[in-house]
Image: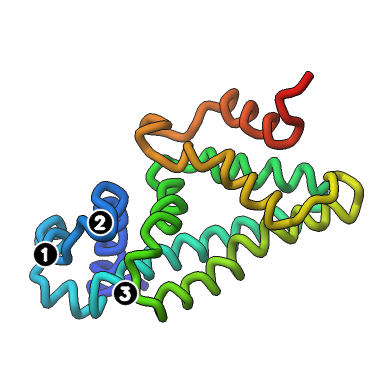
C-alpha cells in the first residue's frame, strides 16, 4: 500500500535521480530538488537527512534492481556465455537514464564522505561487481572463456559498455538491437577476423 509519505519518497527519488544525472552530485543542491518537486526543503529533509543520503538511496535502489536481474540471469540453465550476453542485453536495453546511474555511481563516489563511500563500495561489490565476476569465473572454470584475472574481465566488460552509460550517446530510448549485438560480439569475440 502506498501512503502519501511513501509516494512522496518515491517521487523524490525519481526526480532527484534525473537531476543528479543532469547536474552531477556537486552541481546539485537540495534546494533545487525541493523546487523541482514543488515541496519545502523541510519536507525533503523529512525523508532524507542530506544530499548524500538521498544520492546513496538512489544508487542502492538501482543496485537492488541490478542484483535481482543478475540473480534471475544466473539462475537460468544456460551457458556462462549466454548469461553474460543476457546481462549485457539487459543493461544496454535499459532506458538511457537507467544506464546513466552506473556512470553516476563511478564518477561521483569521490564526492561522498569516506564512511559513505566505503559502505557503498561494499554494497556495489556484493550486489553488482562480485556477481559479474562470478559469472565470468564460472565460464572460465567450464572452459567457455579464456583464463584471465576475473577483475580484468569484469572491468573490460563494463568498460566496453561505459560510453553507452551517457544518455547523450544513446538517444531517447534503449539502444537498437543491432548495436547491442555488435557490442556483445566485440566483447565476446573481439574484432580480429
* Numbered disc 3: secondary structure: helix
Give the residue at the far right of this rendering: 143
* Numbered disc 1: secondary structure: helix
Q: Which residue is mark 1?
A: 31
**Around disc 1, counting alpha carbons within 10 Å, would you say few (fewer than 14), some (14 to 19), or many (20 or more)?**
few
Q: Which residue is mark 3?
A: 53
* Numbered disc 2: secondary structure: helix
Looking at the image, tell me whether mark 3 or mark 2 is earlier in sequence order.
2
**Label number found at residue 131:** none
User: Alpha carbon of mark 1 to alpha carbon of mark 3: how far?
Assistant: 15 Å
Q: In the drawing, does residue 111 fall left or right of residue 119?
A: left
Looking at the image, tell me whether mark 1 or mark 3 is earlier in sequence order.
1
**At 91% from the left edge and 48% from the top edge, which residue is drawn?**
143
**Around disc 3, counting alpha carbons within 10 Å, would you say few (fewer than 14), some (14 to 19), or many (20 or more)?**
some
Q: Position of residue 45 (x, y in %)?
A: 18, 77
**At 37% from the left edge and 73% from the top edge, which residue is drawn?**
1
Identify which residue, 45 or 146, lies in the foreground.
146
Residue 66 drawn above or below residue 190: below
Q: Are marks 2 and 1 in contact (CB under 8 Å)?
A: no
User: Alpha carbon of mark 2 to alpha carbon of mark 1: how far?
Assistant: 13 Å
Q: Which residue is mark 2?
A: 15
Q: In the drawing, does residue 78 fall left or right of residue 180?
A: right
Amino acid at each position: 500500500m502506498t501512503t502519501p509519505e511513501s509516494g512522496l519518497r518515491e517521487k523524490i527519488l525519481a526526480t532527484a535521480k534525473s537531476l543528479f544525472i543532469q547536474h552531477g552530485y556537486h552541481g546539485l543542491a537540495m534546494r533545487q530538488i525541493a523546487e523541482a518537486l514543488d515541496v519545502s526543503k523541510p519536507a525533503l529533509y523529512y525523508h532524507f537527512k542530506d544530499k548524500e543520503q538521498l544520492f546513496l538511496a538512489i544508487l542502492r535502489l538501482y543496485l537492488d534492481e541490478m542484483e535481482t536481474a543478475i540473480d534471475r540471469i544466473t539462475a537460468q540453465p544456460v551457458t556462462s556465455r549466454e548469461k553474460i550476453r543476457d546481462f549485457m542485453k539487459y543493461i544496454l536495453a535499459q532506458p538511457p537514464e537507467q544506464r546513466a546511474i552506473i556512470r553516476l555511481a563511478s564518477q561521483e563516489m569521490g564526492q561522498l564522505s569516506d564512511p559513505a563511500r566505503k559502505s557503498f563500495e561494499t554494497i556495489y561489490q556484493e550486489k553488482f561487481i562480485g556477481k559479474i565476476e562470478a559469472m565470468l569465473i564460472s565460464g572460465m572454470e567450464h572452459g567457455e572463456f579464456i583464463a584471465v584475472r576475473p577483475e580484468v574481465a569484469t572491468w573490460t566488460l563494463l568498460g566496453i559498455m561505459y560510453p553507452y552509460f551517457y544518455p547523450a550517446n544513446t538517444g531517447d530510448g534503449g539502444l537498437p538491437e543491432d548495436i547491442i549485438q555488435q557490442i556483445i560480439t566485440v566483447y565476446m569475440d573481439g574484432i580480429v577476423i
